[in-house]
């Protein structure tokens, strides 16, 4: 299971890659493995304003349907259109071509409440 | 197997109709041109072909009449045939929904009595039979919750659901305009009182609980839960999907629940799962009776009438009066069993579940190891270490002639296998199922490949699941979902 050191993580299994006040969000390798083959992704509208922990997108796999939550309060600035035709990218490259949306943060201080790679690893290995 | 459309031969007919005894008119004279189609694309086949086609299709099905169906949470128990016979009596079957009250007294009486029996079983004060299924019952229950608080002039915006809840619970709350708050279960698998107290503020309209919950565990602190909810002015809703676990033994009304929906098509043995339709009556305590959907059925002396004059009612939620045929079947079931029989239903449902749980728990991980109610949840965690997923175990069961249990639900157990044997199965059936499960656990260690590639068209033991006959293998669920092929032939534009 891959957990890149440079990313921040939410307990709900999203990762966020931060560049200044902009961020890219996807789901972790662990999450895609749990979901199994992703068959459909419902992307948010660009411009949608969400608060931390609010559902933004939906990922559907053969096994289940899961909400994807905003790791920080933000405005959606971009979506990965590629996933509409090729949802399997989330399984193949969860941290790369399988990204889900881009956002502009409202309050970068909220990042402090997210988990580091080490902390995230602990939460997934203690999952029941 | 070919589709019926593929068997079509131009000009072939099942029957020939006699000549019309009134002068024939051309269709073009009766229907405007733009509403006419040149071709209907109906299959042209003989009667024998139709009968063979559909008879063959019916044998491809696996149902409760063909075998054991341990589908946890969905209660697939055997549905006594006497219910069908009673529902087919001409007086019930041929009744027209717009027939007036005077000519529908028998039907009204049956509905009235059914409501009263359900009140007695659940400890509620009033019932509506209108909702067509559990989910619609839930929605009706929450609409009544909303109407209740609006009438009192209270603004409440939140609904609390546990993380083990049925997916319909937060969905109904959202549909009703509420924000749903999920609380984590404790290590015993039940509601965490501390967590509940943290989120239970004056904005909470209702707590929705399934009791026993989806792990098949009884909420032991239910009295405390309903007490603190009421202290905060909130209502408590019982998702009565699992009522079969304590039928005739305990009553949700006595536990402090204010609203409950029942699934007649589960607990009260009317067919479902494609054989429905369903029925999801909702019961309420006195304070909510004025908000019940209208019309209600009232009795005056020995006459029954429909009461539409109910100013606080949330209105009608189903055409006519609900799925009447289903009510007849449930009523027949209730009257056949009587109070003692109903109690035995619950006792045997719980006994059967515990028997199976005990037999299987040394082969499969049991996350909540305590006495269960009518169902229990195993985890395929141990098998996963050999690379075998719960999905594979479910598919392998088909090779042994059983329908698979519910898998990957509830969401709080990884690799969940949810088993509900129901009270209608014999010890022999339970033993056969247990030995199949145990064999699969052993195969996982000795020959995991056979489990990973199941089902097999030529399963050993000669008990092949009908759907795998004729060389059918595991379906490619991923491609089916990513590139669904829903038509046998493209429409010519």
Image: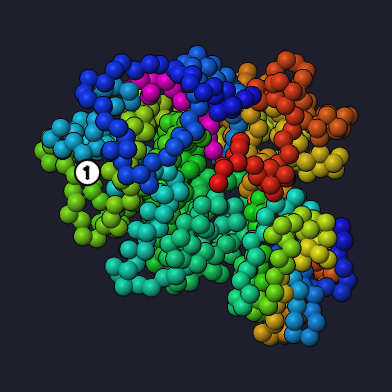
Pointer 1 chain: B
Tell which of B32 and B288 is nearer to you: B32
Q: Does residue B308 lie above or below B65 as drawn? A: below
Region rendered in magenta: B74-86
Depth order, front residue of A12/B419: A12
Say whether residue B368 is left or right of residue B93: right
Tell me which colouring the rendered structure shows: rainbow
User: Where is A68 relative to B485, above or below?
Assistant: below
Please tell me which residue is depicted at 41% across the width and 70% down the height of the picture: B156
Is any atom of residue B349 visible in this view?
Answer: no
Q: At 72% across and 53% down in the image, what residue appears?
A: A38
Q: Which is more toward the observer, A19 or B291?
A: A19
Structural crowding at the residue carrying mark 1, measured as other residues with C-alpha within 10 Å and reported as few (<14), some (14–19) or many (≥20): many
Q: Which quarter of the figure has residue B40? A: top left
Q: Is residue B409 above or below residue B361?
A: below
Query: Residue B414, position in %: x, y?
Result: 72, 48
Q: Is residue A8 left or right of residue B208?
A: right
Q: The N terminus of chain B lies in which quarter of the figure? A: top right
Which residue is tagged 1? B297
Residue A16, position in %: x, y?
A: 77, 73
Q: Is mark 1 on a helix, strand or loop?
A: strand
Say which of B42 and B385 sits in front: B42
């Amino acid at each position: 299971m891959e957990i890149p050191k440079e990313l921040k993580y939410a307990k709900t299994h999203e990762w966020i890659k931060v560049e200044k006040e902009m961020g890219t969000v996807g789901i972790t390798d662990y999450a895609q493995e749990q979901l199994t083959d992703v068959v459909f992704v419902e992307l948010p509208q660009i411009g949608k304003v969400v608060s931390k922990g609010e559902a933004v997108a939906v990922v559907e796999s053969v096994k289940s349907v899961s909400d994807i939550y905003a790791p920080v309060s933000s405005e959606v600035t971009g979506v990965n259109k590629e996933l509409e035709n090729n949802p399997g990218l989330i399984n193949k490259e969860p941290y790369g071509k399988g990204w889900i949306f881009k956002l502009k943060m409202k309050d970068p201080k909220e990042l402090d409440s997210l988990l580091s790679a080490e902390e995230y690893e602990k939460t997934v290995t203690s999952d029941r | 197997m070919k589709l019926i459309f593929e068997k079509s031969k131009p000009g072939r007919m099942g029957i020939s109709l006699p000549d019309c005894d009134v002068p024939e008119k051309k269709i073009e004279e009766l229907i405007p041109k733009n509403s006419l189609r040149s071709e209907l694309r109906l299959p042209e086949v003989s009667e024998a072909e139709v009968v063979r086609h559909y008879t063959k299709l019916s044998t491809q099905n696996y149902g409760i009449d063909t075998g054991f169906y341990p589908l946890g949470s969905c209660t697939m128990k055997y549905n006594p045939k006497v219910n069908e016979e009673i529902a087919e009596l001409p007086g019930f079957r041929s009744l027209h929904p717009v027939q007036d009250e005077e000519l529908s007294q028998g039907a009204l009486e049956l509905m009235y009595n059914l409501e009263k029996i359900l009140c007695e079983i659940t400890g509620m004060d009033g019932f509506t039979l209108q909702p067509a299924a559990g989910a619609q019952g839930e929605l009706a229950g929450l609409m009544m919750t909303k109407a209740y608080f609006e009438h009192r002039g209270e603004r409440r915006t939140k609904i609390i659901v546990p993380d083990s809840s049925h997916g319909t619970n937060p969905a109904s709350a959202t549909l009703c305009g509420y924000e749903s708050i999920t609380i984590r279960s404790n290590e015993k698998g039940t509601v965490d009182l501390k967590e509940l107290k943290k989120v239970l503020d004056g904005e909470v309209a209702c707590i929705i609980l399934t009791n026993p919950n989806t792990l098949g565990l009884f909420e032991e602190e239910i009295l405390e839960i309903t007490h603190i909810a009421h202290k905060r002015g909130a209502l408590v809703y019982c998702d009565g999907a699992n009522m079969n676990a304590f039928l005739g033994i305990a009553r949700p009304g006595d536990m402090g629940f204010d609203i409950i929906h029942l699934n007649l098509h589960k607990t009260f043995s009317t067919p479902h799962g494609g054989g429905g339709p369903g029925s999801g009556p909702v019961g309420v305590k006195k304070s909510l009776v004025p908000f019940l959907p209208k019309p209600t059925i009232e009795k005056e002396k020995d006459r029954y009438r429909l009461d539409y004059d109910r100013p606080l009612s949330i209105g009608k939620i189903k055409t006519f009066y609900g799925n009447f045929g289903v009510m007849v079947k449930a009523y027949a079931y209730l009257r056949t069993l009587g109070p003692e029989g109903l109690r035995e239903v619950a006792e045997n449902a719980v006994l059967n579940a515990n028997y199976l749980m005990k037999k299987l728990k040394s082969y499969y991980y049991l996350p909540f190891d305590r006495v269960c109610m009518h169902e229990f949840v195993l985890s395929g965690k141990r098998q996963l270490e050999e690379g075998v997923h719960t999905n594979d175990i479910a598919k392998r069961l088909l090779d042994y002639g059983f329908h698979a249990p519910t898998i990957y639900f509830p969401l709080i157990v990884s690799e969940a296998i949810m088993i509900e044997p129901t009270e209608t199965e014999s010890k022999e059936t339970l033993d056969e199922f247990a030995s199949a499960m145990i064999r699969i656990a052993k195969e996982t260690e000795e020959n995991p490949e056979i489990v990973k590639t199941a089902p097999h068209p030529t399963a050993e033991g000669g008990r092949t699941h009908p759907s795998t006959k004729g060389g059918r293998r595991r379906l490619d669920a991923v491609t089916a979902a990513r590139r669904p092929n829903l038509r046998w032939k493209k429409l010519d534009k």
